[in-house]
Protein backbone atom coordinates (compact mmCIF):
# COMPACT_ATOMS: atom_id res chain seq x y z
CA UNK A 1 0.00 0.00 0.00
CA UNK A 2 2.16 2.83 1.30
CA UNK A 3 5.15 1.48 -0.61
CA UNK A 4 3.75 3.12 -3.71
CA UNK A 5 5.75 6.37 -4.09
CA UNK A 6 2.92 7.93 -6.04
CA UNK A 7 0.74 7.77 -2.91
CA UNK A 8 3.10 10.20 -1.17
CA UNK A 9 2.79 12.55 -4.11
CA UNK A 10 -1.01 12.31 -3.97
CA UNK A 11 -1.02 12.90 -0.21
CA UNK A 12 1.19 15.94 -0.71
CA UNK A 13 -1.05 17.42 -3.41
CA UNK A 14 -4.24 16.82 -1.47
CA UNK A 15 -2.83 18.33 1.72
CA UNK A 16 -1.13 21.32 0.04
CA UNK A 17 -4.28 22.29 -1.85
CA UNK A 18 -7.74 22.72 -0.33
CA UNK A 19 -9.53 21.49 -3.43
CA UNK A 20 -7.92 19.10 -5.88
CA UNK A 21 -9.57 17.65 -8.95
CA UNK A 22 -7.87 14.69 -10.55
CA UNK A 23 -9.07 14.94 -14.11
CA UNK A 24 -8.43 14.21 -17.77
CA UNK A 25 -7.00 17.33 -19.36
CA UNK A 26 -6.65 20.72 -17.71
CA UNK A 27 -9.35 22.92 -16.14
CA UNK A 28 -9.22 25.21 -19.18
CA UNK A 29 -9.14 22.29 -21.61
CA UNK A 30 -10.77 19.15 -20.19
CA UNK A 31 -10.39 16.10 -22.40
CA UNK A 32 -13.37 14.10 -21.23
CA UNK A 33 -16.99 15.07 -20.76
CA UNK A 34 -17.08 13.88 -17.17
CA UNK A 35 -14.02 15.93 -16.24
CA UNK A 36 -15.51 18.92 -18.06
CA UNK A 37 -18.67 18.59 -15.99
CA UNK A 38 -16.70 18.43 -12.75
CA UNK A 39 -14.79 21.60 -13.69
CA UNK A 40 -18.03 23.33 -14.64
CA UNK A 41 -19.57 22.51 -11.26
CA UNK A 42 -16.57 23.81 -9.32
CA UNK A 43 -16.46 26.98 -11.44
CA UNK A 44 -20.14 27.64 -10.88
CA UNK A 45 -19.60 27.37 -7.15
CA UNK A 46 -16.72 29.82 -7.39
CA UNK A 47 -14.34 27.22 -6.03
CA UNK A 48 -10.63 27.78 -6.43
CA UNK A 49 -9.11 24.39 -7.20
CA UNK A 50 -6.04 22.69 -8.51
CA UNK A 51 -6.62 20.44 -11.50
CA UNK A 52 -4.22 17.55 -11.93
CA UNK A 53 -4.12 16.07 -15.40
CA UNK A 54 -3.86 12.30 -15.07
CA UNK A 55 -3.39 11.87 -18.82
CA UNK A 56 0.02 13.50 -18.61
CA UNK A 57 1.10 11.22 -15.76
CA UNK A 58 0.32 7.49 -16.04
CA UNK A 59 1.68 6.84 -12.53
CA UNK A 60 -0.83 9.27 -11.03
CA UNK A 61 -3.57 7.99 -13.32
CA UNK A 62 -3.24 4.46 -11.98
CA UNK A 63 -2.13 5.49 -8.51
CA UNK A 64 -5.14 7.68 -7.77
CA UNK A 65 -7.53 4.85 -8.62
CA UNK A 66 -5.83 2.60 -6.11
CA UNK A 67 -5.35 5.38 -3.55
CA UNK A 68 -9.06 6.26 -3.49
CA UNK A 69 -10.28 2.73 -4.24
CA UNK A 70 -12.22 4.37 -7.04
CA UNK A 71 -12.07 3.16 -10.66
CA UNK A 72 -12.85 6.32 -12.59
CA UNK A 73 -11.69 9.89 -13.22
CA UNK A 74 -12.53 12.67 -12.25
CA UNK A 75 -12.03 12.49 -8.52
CA UNK A 76 -12.60 15.37 -6.14
CA UNK A 77 -10.59 15.88 -2.95
CA UNK A 78 -11.44 18.57 -0.40
CA UNK A 79 -9.03 19.16 2.48
CA UNK A 80 -7.46 15.79 1.89
CA UNK A 81 -10.78 13.96 1.93
CA UNK A 82 -12.12 12.05 -1.07
CA UNK A 83 -15.56 13.46 -1.86
CA UNK A 84 -16.45 11.45 -4.94
CA UNK A 85 -16.50 11.18 -8.69
CA UNK A 86 -18.63 13.06 -11.19
CA UNK A 87 -21.94 11.30 -10.34
CA UNK A 88 -21.62 12.20 -6.68
CA UNK A 89 -20.50 15.72 -7.53
CA UNK A 90 -23.50 16.20 -9.79
CA UNK A 91 -25.91 14.76 -7.24
CA UNK A 92 -24.46 16.94 -4.47
CA UNK A 93 -24.39 20.01 -6.70
CA UNK A 94 -28.03 19.61 -7.73
CA UNK A 95 -29.21 19.20 -4.15
CA UNK A 96 -27.16 22.20 -3.00
CA UNK A 97 -25.19 19.90 -0.73
CA UNK A 98 -21.87 20.49 -2.45
CA UNK A 99 -22.12 24.24 -1.97
CA UNK A 100 -22.88 23.91 1.73
CA UNK A 101 -20.16 21.28 2.11
CA UNK A 102 -17.54 23.57 0.54
CA UNK A 103 -18.66 26.49 2.68
CA UNK A 104 -18.57 24.35 5.79
CA UNK A 105 -15.03 23.35 4.95
CA UNK A 106 -14.25 27.04 4.49
CA UNK A 107 -12.92 26.54 0.96
CA UNK A 108 -15.41 28.79 -0.79
CA UNK A 109 -16.66 32.08 0.54
CA UNK A 110 -20.17 32.17 1.90
CA UNK A 111 -22.32 34.43 -0.27
CA UNK B 1 -15.63 -1.76 -25.95
CA UNK B 2 -19.17 -2.52 -25.04
CA UNK B 3 -20.85 -4.33 -22.23
CA UNK B 4 -24.25 -5.94 -22.21
CA UNK B 5 -26.66 -4.27 -19.74
CA UNK B 6 -27.94 -7.72 -18.76
CA UNK B 7 -24.42 -8.62 -17.69
CA UNK B 8 -24.13 -5.41 -15.64
CA UNK B 9 -27.37 -6.21 -13.85
CA UNK B 10 -26.33 -9.83 -13.31
CA UNK B 11 -23.03 -8.85 -11.68
CA UNK B 12 -24.69 -6.31 -9.39
CA UNK B 13 -27.36 -8.80 -8.32
CA UNK B 14 -24.78 -11.49 -7.78
CA UNK B 15 -23.13 -9.28 -5.16
CA UNK B 16 -26.33 -7.65 -3.89
CA UNK B 17 -29.13 -10.22 -4.22
CA UNK B 18 -31.79 -7.87 -2.82
CA UNK B 19 -30.91 -5.07 -5.23
CA UNK B 20 -33.44 -3.45 -7.49
CA UNK B 21 -31.45 -2.49 -10.56
CA UNK B 22 -32.56 -0.24 -13.36
CA UNK B 23 -30.22 0.32 -16.28
CA UNK B 24 -30.59 2.78 -19.11
CA UNK B 25 -28.48 2.91 -22.26
CA UNK B 26 -27.75 6.63 -22.52
CA UNK B 27 -26.25 6.87 -25.96
CA UNK B 28 -27.50 3.72 -27.65
CA UNK B 29 -23.90 2.63 -28.19
CA UNK B 30 -23.77 -0.08 -25.52
CA UNK B 31 -21.06 1.89 -23.78
CA UNK B 32 -22.72 4.70 -21.84
CA UNK B 33 -25.15 3.56 -19.20
CA UNK B 34 -26.93 4.97 -16.22
CA UNK B 35 -27.79 2.65 -13.37
CA UNK B 36 -30.08 3.14 -10.46
CA UNK B 37 -29.41 0.63 -7.70
CA UNK B 38 -31.55 0.26 -4.59
CA UNK B 39 -30.34 -2.11 -1.89
CA UNK B 40 -30.40 -2.61 1.86
CA UNK B 41 -26.64 -3.15 1.66
CA UNK B 42 -26.25 0.63 1.34
CA UNK B 43 -27.75 1.31 4.74
CA UNK B 44 -25.42 3.25 7.01
CA UNK B 45 -22.96 3.84 4.17
CA UNK B 46 -22.05 7.18 2.68
CA UNK B 47 -22.29 7.80 -1.07
CA UNK B 48 -18.67 7.00 -1.74
CA UNK B 49 -18.99 3.67 0.07
CA UNK B 50 -22.25 2.87 -1.72
CA UNK B 51 -20.67 3.45 -5.12
CA UNK B 52 -17.61 1.44 -4.10
CA UNK B 53 -19.88 -1.52 -3.30
CA UNK B 54 -21.33 -1.39 -6.82
CA UNK B 55 -17.90 -0.94 -8.44
CA UNK B 56 -16.65 -3.99 -6.54
CA UNK B 57 -19.66 -5.97 -7.77
CA UNK B 58 -18.57 -5.10 -11.31
CA UNK B 59 -15.21 -6.75 -10.62
CA UNK B 60 -12.86 -4.27 -12.22
CA UNK B 61 -14.91 -3.72 -15.37
CA UNK B 62 -15.75 -0.17 -14.35
CA UNK B 63 -13.22 2.17 -15.89
CA UNK B 64 -12.14 -0.65 -18.16
CA UNK B 65 -14.51 -2.31 -20.58
CA UNK B 66 -17.32 -0.32 -19.03
CA UNK B 67 -16.41 3.27 -19.80
CA UNK B 68 -19.39 5.13 -18.48
CA UNK B 69 -21.90 4.10 -15.87
CA UNK B 70 -23.63 7.03 -14.22
CA UNK B 71 -24.49 5.64 -10.84
CA UNK B 72 -27.25 6.49 -8.46
CA UNK B 73 -27.58 4.47 -5.27
CA UNK B 74 -30.17 4.49 -2.53
CA UNK B 75 -31.73 2.37 0.19
CA UNK B 76 -35.29 0.99 -0.05
CA UNK B 77 -37.90 3.49 1.13
Image (cartoon, coloured by chain):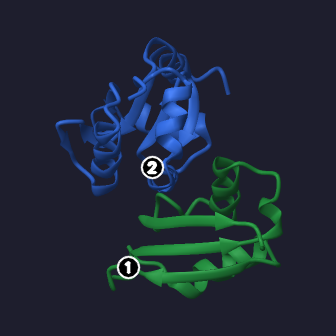
Q: Is residue A4 above or below residue B14?
A: above
Q: Which residue is mark 1?
A: B26
Q: Is residue A10 left or right of residue A58?
A: right
Residue A101 location (% of width, % of height): 54, 35
Whether the residues at callouts 2 and 1 have beta carbons within 8 Å, the answer is: no
Q: Chain of mark 1?
A: B
Q: Marks 2/1: CA distance?
A: 21 Å
Residue B5 location (% of width, % of height): 53, 84
Q: Is residue A55 left or right of residue B54?
A: left
Asked where in the image residue B8 lies, by quadrant, the reply is bottom right
Packing grade of label 2 (10 A; few <14, some 14-19, many >=20) is some
Q: Chain of mark 2?
A: A
In the current view of this chain or complex, which residue is farthest to the left? A29
Residue visible at 42% across and 65% down in the picture: B68
Instruction: Label 1, secondary structure: give it.
Output: loop
Instruction: Label 2, secondary structure: give it.
Output: helix
Q: Which chain is painted in blue?
A: A
Q: Is residue B58 above or below residue A88?
A: below
Residue A64 location (% of width, % of height): 50, 35
Res. A87 visible in picture: yes
In the current view of this chain or complex, which residue is farthest to the front? A111
Q: In front: B8, or B25? A: B25
Q: Which residue is mark 2?
A: A93
Residue visible at 65% across and 73% down in the picture: B37
Residue B38 location (% of width, % of height): 71, 73
Residue visible at 22% across and 48% down in the picture: A31
- The quarter of the picture where the N terminus of chain A appears is top right
Residue visible at 40% across and 23% down in the picture: A109
- The quarter of the picture where the C terminus of chain A appears is top left
Amino acid sequence: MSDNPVFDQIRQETSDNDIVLFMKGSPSFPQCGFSAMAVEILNRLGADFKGIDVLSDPAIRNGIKEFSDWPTIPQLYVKGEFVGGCDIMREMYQSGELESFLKEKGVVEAA
Amino acid sequence: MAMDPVEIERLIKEALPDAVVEIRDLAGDGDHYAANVVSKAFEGKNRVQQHQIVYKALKGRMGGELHALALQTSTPA
